[in-house]
Image (tube, rainbow, N blue to C red):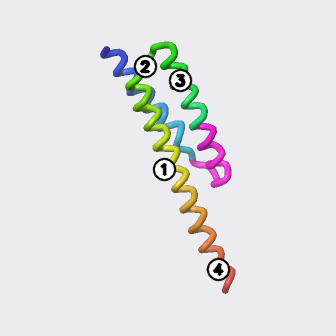
Amino acid sequence: MVATKSLSENYMSLILQSIKSENPISKLKKNNKESLKEMIKFLSRLNKKNQIDEKQFEELVTLVCANFIENEVELRIEKTISNKIMFFFDKF
């Protein structure tokens, strides 16, 4: 059980690193969706191979989805602010 906890900590670290990217907005949005898809596949494989239990799988999927949503909201806010700033400067 101790080894499993260590594995789950490593997986959570991997998830957090893979979701966060520093790319231009359009690429980041695409990468965010691809990261979500790949992490769900990865976690499903681990669950299927019994390398993580059902509870760990659910918690990790929840974390991955929460990060995806956070990134999507951040991207939309950033895009809106950028558009407003450009609109403001275009007036002058």
Mark 2 nearby-residue class (10 Å; few <14, some 14–19, many ≥20): many
Q: Which residue is disc 1 drawn over? A: 70
Main structural element of the magenta stretch: helix, strand or loop?
Answer: helix
In the rendered structure, which disc, 4 or 1, sits on the residue that comes first in sequence?
1
Alpha carbon of mark 3 to alpha carbon of mark 1: how far? 22 Å
Whether residue 46 sits left or right of residue 5 in the image: it is right
SS assignment at label 2: loop
Residue 21 screen position, x and y as percent: 56, 45
SS assignment at label 4: helix
SS assignment at label 3: helix
> Where is 70 relative to 92, above or below?
above
Q: How many marks?
A: 4
Kindly identify the amino acid type of the residue bearing the numbered disc 2.
Ile
Q: Which residue is disc 2 drawn over? A: 52
SS assignment at label 1: helix
Alpha carbon of mark 2 to alpha carbon of mark 1: how far? 25 Å
Residue 45 screen position, x and y as percent: 54, 20
Kindly identify the amino acid type of the residue bearing the numbered disc 1.
Glu
Q: What residue is rendered at 56% in x and 62% in y? A: 78
Q: Which residue is disc 3 drawn over? A: 44
Q: Which mark is residue 89?
A: 4
Residue sitting nearer the eye, 27 or 52: 52
Q: Nearer the viewer, mark 3 or mark 4?
A: 3
Q: What residue is rendered at 60% in x and 31% in y? A: 38
Kindly identify the amino acid type of the residue bearing the numbered disc 3.
Ser
Mark 2 and mark 3 in contact (Cβ < 8 Å)? no
Residue 46 screen position, x and y as percent: 50, 19
Which region is colored magenta? 22-35
Residue 88 screen position, x and y as percent: 62, 80
The extreme bottom residue here reads 92
In the rendered structure, which disc, 3 or 4, sits on the residue that comes first in sequence?
3
> Where is 80 relative to 39, above or below?
below
